[in-house]
Image (tube, helix red, strand yellow):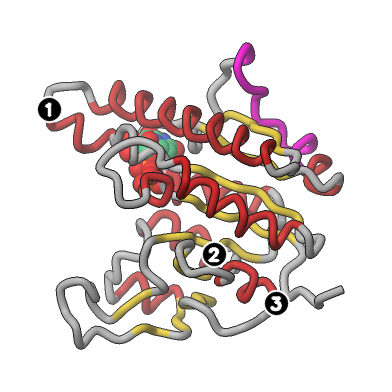
Amino acid sequence: MTAVAYKRILLKLSGEALMGEDKYGINHAVMGRIVAEIQEVSKLGVEIAIVVGGGNIFRGMKSANDGLERVTADYMGMLATVMNALALQDAMKLVGLVPRIQSALRIEQVVEPYIRGRAIRYLKDGRVVIFAAGTGNPFFTTDTAAALRGMEMNADIMLKATKVDGIYTSDPKINPDATRFHQLSFDEAITKNLQVMDATALTLCRDQKLPLNVFSIFKTGALKRIITGEDEGTLVTV
Ligand code: UDP
């Protein structure tokens, strides 16, 4: 069996990743590709917990500007993550993975509530746990939820799947001279304001010494390369 560098991971999948090149919603072909990448590492015996975002359907901050109360908009954003979790669950079942969704907001006819001990048991049993509804609180992001659940699950690393293959000195889409960091400290990421993820999430990871790897989910095999300890994307550590 291939040796793995991380036994238990927390994968953060943004809504944007699920959208692919579309402008809105879920692209099912893209979802299928992402699930295939996840299945590859599941076959290695890695325990996988996932936090899904909701930005492909609803983003609280933006809609708050359009006249909704911020808290209302944030709850709508959290509900959007539940929709993504449901779609992800079905895509996983199609390939034979056994997913379980747990939600930070109670909607028990649809998904079970977040219960830490049960989630850990699922992971040990080889199920893929999908955490929905972020932290369950407005004014937070699913990046912060990912840091939080990563810590609660005692994950070995948090993997942030994006469309870009790591953290760059500046936006590579705007600046062709931007270069990728192979490795970075949390303090550098925070003080250089590198737009990796919000400061709350970065600070949580730093304080609890949860390493973070930012990588592209669209680069075939990238997730597996990280798991087997190869240099892929950007690794952020204390
Ligand atoms: N959200 C929230 N609390 C949380 C997580 C998310 O209020 O703990 C809301 C917030 O409005 C956010 C939306 O849900 O804009 C979708 O989450 P996020 O923007 O993090 O999704 P992503 O960018 O990863 O797709």
In the rendering, at what x and y percent does residue 45 appear?
A: 81, 60
Q: Residue at x 48, y 69 (%)?
A: 219
Counting from the top left corner in percent of width and height, residue 141 is at 40, 44
Inspect the image, locate mark 2, and give the three-letter code of the amino acid beneath it: Asp
Q: Is residue 113 visible?
A: yes
Give the x, y percent position of residue 27: 41, 42
Task: Tell me which segment is drawn in magenta.
Answer: 108-119
Query: Residue at coordinates 69% horizontally, 53% vertically from top-left?
Result: 48
Q: Residue at x 29, y 45 (%)?
A: 22
Amino acid at circle 1: Asp
- Tag 2–tag 1 contact (CB < 8 Å): no
- Checking the image for residue 228, the label placed there is 3
Q: Nearer the viewer, mark 2 or mark 1?
A: 1
Q: Residues within 10 Å of mark 3 (few under 14, many from 20)?
A: some
Q: Quadrant of residue 132?
A: top right
Task: Label 1, secondary structure: give it.
Answer: loop
- Residue 116 belongs to the span the image colors magenta: yes
Q: In this view of the protein, can residue 139 be seen by the observer?
A: no
Q: Nearer the viewer, mark 3 or mark 2?
A: 3
Q: Disc 2 or 1, which lies upstream in sequence?
A: 1
Most extreme residue toward the top is 109
Which residue was labeled with disc 2?
207
Q: Is residue 23 magenta?
A: no
